[in-house]
Image (cartoon, rainbow, N blue to C red):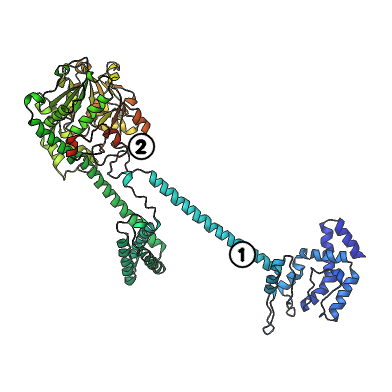
Amino acid sequence: MALKRGVNRIRGGGGGSRSAFILLVFFCVFAPLVFFVGRGVYIDSSNDYSNGSVKQDLDWRERLAMKSLRSLFSKEVLDVITASTADLGPFSLDSFKKNNFSASWREVDTSVRHTQNQTTSGVMNAKRDITSKGGSHQKAETPAKFYRRQLREKRREMRANELVQRNDDTILKLENAAIERSKSVDSAVLGKYSIWRRENENDNSDSNIRLMRDQVIMARVYCGIAKLKNKTELLQELQARIKDSQRVLGEATTDADLPRSAHDKLRDMGQALSKAKMQLYDCKLVTGKLRAMLQTADEQVRSLKKQSTFLAQLAAKTIPNPIHCLSMRLTIDYYLLSPEKRKFPRRENRENPNLYHYALFSDNVLAASVVVNSTIMNAKDPSKHVFHLVTDKLNFAAMNMWFLLNPPGKATIHVENVDEFKWLNSSYCPVLRQLESAAMKEYYFKADHPSSGSSNLKYRNPKYLSMLNHLRFYLPEVYPKLNKILFLDDDIIVQKDLTPLWEVNLNGKVNGAVETCGESFHRFDKYLNFSNPHIARNFNPNACGWAYGMNMFDLKEWKKRDITGIYHKWQNMNENRTLWKLGTLPPGLITFYGLTHPLDKSWHVLGLGYNPSIAKKDIQNAAVVHYNGNMKPWLELAMSKYRPYWTKYIKFDHPYLRRCNLHE
């Protein structure tokens, strides 16, 4: 009755009374049962006590205990005791079995019915742990623990597979992102000139080629380590595998280019690398070797960049064979003409200040023809345009012959030879005197000059030796009867009518030009030596630079302010090149300092000779497009995406062009 009252308290009471009652039941009832369990009695908790069935092999003590239990407790009490065994902690039967308190206790084979029918047979077979060997005592795993262990193992396996899959996906995403970034990079970067263009780039996306190249790199690493550790046989094997892989790779750029033996070479190299890894792998040594290889590769890249810069500068200085051929053929045919046929029409327009005059100084016949053609094709009234071309004596005949054969509509052409300007001599022109000096010749032609590094290569261009480049500072002397003139470089094309430029009010300034100080490297401190006191006292290092190529000059204001005299003064001070390097832009910035009127940027877009990232919209909206830089449109190293803007003004079916193999 006391136990029944305890059961009622458990149903309606708190946790404390429940725990006390369970402890009482254990000492009163379960303590004797421990003895029987240790002897081999196992009560199946899943059995229904109401059926009164017990195992037939119980001895008389066990039958007596079962009768006592049934007489003492009702079915409700037995159910509570069964449900509460998990709360007994160290006093539970499982705890007694685990700790093996008595050497006489032994574990008994049993068959347990599991609630899940699918795993019943597997759990029962795994549960059997028969003490068949000479009374040795072994611990048995309960069905519940076995099932939980299986679940844990399955979860671990699933988690491991998930992590491996996630890692593979991450690596694949990183590789794809790296490939996309490499595709977006153009080899021609700002300020650096390279002959490699996007169409020549190789994505190298084929896995076998990449794997073979990676294998060769790792084989070289292990070769260095093998040499350090005197592993002669392994070293020879790795070297042989490297040669085989390099022979298979050859000039292949895709997996399709590889021979059939490539897979065998991949396998052989993989085996050699596995052997090397087992014998030689040392994290510190491998890291050091890779770092050394990286430094060596970096030095090679710098050397190749320097060589590339030199070759690009060399290519920019040369005249392509087809253009040279064109000049020679035109020269021959010009001298076959009679003197009467060598004259241009409309000679009276040359000095008419009411017309639109252009100054173009060039020794490139094809480039000059593009400038003239593009200007006339976009002009509203070509008859009012006058082109003053000045060239050297080598190209004077060719320039005349081309425009005699291809007159630009009703526009006026005037061609002159710079060598016939008798007033332009070394006694009057400081730069001409400097160019004829021994020091300047040594600077240009002495290969072992201390300053002959790649950084000075662009200043060693033959155009700086030509007076055609410096003639822009003598415009009033060349055209004394003109009031305004538009100066054009020969590496530009005109896309709009330029006559509105003559209506721009320069506000008393001499030079109308587009400023280029949107970037920091186009300010005065980029071009002038501000460590020199003469420069530092007279100029602002942050003053905005501007561009040659399309400049409107007011020749009246030029004469009034004696611009040529200012140029001579600073040119004399720079005889030893201490104020600026060679070129015409630095002295132009000095000469026209405070005398330049900024034009709208849409008049003149620059950079098509070096900048691959100019917006297409900016190019199409520009009145003048300038190929300043080394990648001139008539050279093979020109950027292909900009070249069509220039070639559309050339008639490649012209007989002279066909005979000289000039084509798009």
Disc assigned to residue 153: 1
Disc assigned to residue 613: 2
Q: Nearer the viewer, residue 83 or 21?
A: 83
Across and down, in percent, residue 522 comes to 31, 31
Across and down, in percent, residue 601 comes to 34, 26
Across and down, in percent, residue 175 comes to 44, 51
**Residue 328 placement: quadrant:** top left
Label 1: state its secondary structure: helix
Q: In this view, does 78 lie above or below 450?
A: below
Residue at left 59%, top 60%?
158
Amino acid type of disc 1? Glu
Q: Nearer the viewer, residue 285 or 235?
A: 235
The residue positioned farthest toward the top in the image shown: 354
Q: Nearer the viewer, residue 513 or 384?
A: 384
The residue positioned farthest toward the right in the image shown: 1
**Residue 255 placement: quadrant:** bottom left
User: Can residue 627 be seen from the camera position used here?
Assistant: no
Disc 2 packing (10 Å; few <14; some 14–19; many ≥20): few
Dot in front, 2 or 1: 2
Residue at left 76%, top 68%?
92
Quadrant in the picture for the N terminus = bottom right
Across and down, in percent, residue 564 comes to 18, 22
